[in-house]
Image (cartoon, grey):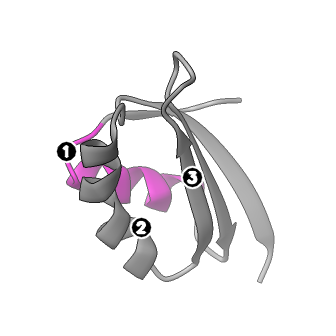
Amino acid sequence: MENKEFQFKTNINCGGCVASVKPHLDKAEGVCEWNVDTTDKDKILTVKTEGISQEQVLDIIRKTGFKAEPIV
């Protein structure tokens, strides 16, 4: 499986938001590591993956009620 790193602009902007997303990203198969920079104005979510697509990561984030937009 190929390891990839994706970055997204999100509206995950505080510790409570991170706590809401955490269980979903932690249990997602293929997500190795993730982090949200809530100090950045764009609230950058970085996700390191193994065998999961960018679209699958977006689906996980959207299902938790947050918005995410890939950074190209």
Residue for badge 2: 25
Eye-nearest disc, 3 or 2: 3
- Picture quadrant where residue 28 is located: bottom left
* 65 w.r.t. 44: above or below: below
In the picture, the disc for residue 35 is 3
Q: Which residue occupies the foreground of this view, 33 or 60?
A: 33
- Taking the view exactly as shown, the residue that stands out farthest to the top is 41
Q: How many numbered badges does the structure rendering display?
A: 3
Q: Which residue: 19% across, 44% down?
A: 65
Q: Which residue is mark 1?
A: 65
Asked if residue 59 is among those painted magenta in the image, a careful observer would answer: yes
Q: Main secondary structure of the magenta part?
A: helix
Disc nearest the viewer among 1 and 3: 3
Element under disc 2: helix
Q: Name the residue: 71% across, 29% down.
A: 72
**Percent position (x, y) of residue 1?**
77, 84
Is residue 18 shown in magenta? no
1 or 3: tag closer to the N-terminus:
3
